[in-house]
Amino acid sequence: MAKKRINLALQGGGAHGAFTWGVLDRLLEEGDIEIAAISGTSAGAMNGAALKSGWIEGGAEGAREKLDWLWGKLGAVHDMRMTTWLAGLMPDTTDLLHTALEYSLPFTFADTVSRMSSPYAFGPFYQNPLRKIAEAFEYEKVCADAGPRLFVGATNVRTGRIRVFSGEEMSADVLLASTCLPTLFQAVDILDPQTGQTEAFWDGGYTGNPALFPLFGKEFPDDILIVNINPLERAEVPVTPQEIQNRINEISFNSSLLRELRVISYAQQMRKTWDSNADGMKNINIHMIADDALMNELSASTKVVPSPFLLVRLKQAGRAAAEGFLAAHKSDLNTRSSVDLNAMFL
């Protein structure tokens, strides 16, 4: 049976990245789907590193086990900035979880402090709670030539541009840079061969969530499957301070992806007016797995609360969304786009 080769584009979104965990867990059960390359940002970068290293170790089943390990570790993080300690006080339903969290006194206090102080105020006592997890990856596997090619995006603080790392450049610092929200964590310094100097990096979601352009190479298949965890649309106009801030967060973390999709849409339209092989233009097929209904029940606050209930709920939703996508669009892979980009930008 011929395999369907695809690229994965994995968004960042903190604890909401557990949705992607579920999607990947289901996709890895499909023996006739081959993942050629992965572009990930923030939580998407962590998911990508887990999938890649697990795949090198034990194929699809090894990748699933490594993803389980990752989210088991993330669910056990106890840090005031990530407010995991609040999880036991929260209701076990997603629609009530974010409301109870946003209006709770402890979260309001922690959120206010993060807006009025700097992570540099910790001085010599500063620690990134994700460092131990990032350092636990076996980088000879994350950087291996075999298996899916992995690309991780981070934002250069000095230039404001995206920097995509791959291959031997991958390290714990690269994963931490890609997940570095500047209101929570200190910028991550990395010696950048492209500039010849040490550069400071923030979360890649500001400039590429995730970056699609690394997946355009001729060696990769035409199909890009995007796992979207930041709602593209919300029906209601936000009116409370919390709702407004949450929608700003979603729009800003979707803007770079939408720009790249618009360029792809334009290129596809131009391609139709020329010969199909004019200038070697690649025909990119775009697919997307998302659950906007669930994500509309959540908010930016639940991104920093990796409670076991929330992570399991998101994994289940991710598996269900992937199941629905495979039932409806597996036959579209390597054939056509299952996302109507023209309609998206009308």
Image (cartoon, helix red, strand yellow):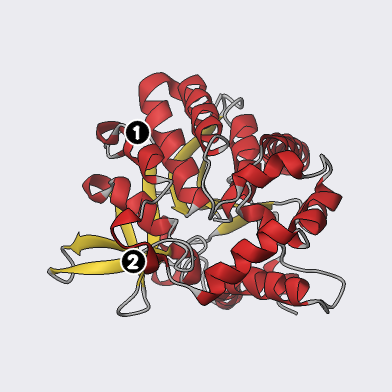
What residue is pinned by disc 1?
Answer: 136
Badge 1 or badge 2: first in the primary sequence: 1
What residue is pinned by disc 2?
Answer: 201
Image-quadrant location for residue 334: top right
Image spot of residue 215 (x, y percent): 43, 56
- Residue at image location 60% in from the left, 50% down from the top: 83
Question: Which element type, helix, strand or loop, lies under badge 2?
Answer: strand
Amino acid on which disc 2 is placed: Phe
Viewer-proximal residue, 127 or 64?
127
Question: Can the viewer see residue 82 in this picture?
Answer: yes
Image spot of residue 287 (x, y percent): 64, 53
| Mark seen at residue 74 | none
Please determine whether, in this image, residue 53 is positioned above or below residue 247: above
Viewer-proximal residue, 218 or 243?
243
Circle 2 packing at 10 Å, graded few (<14), some (14-19), many (20+), is many
**Outermost residue, left side:** 196
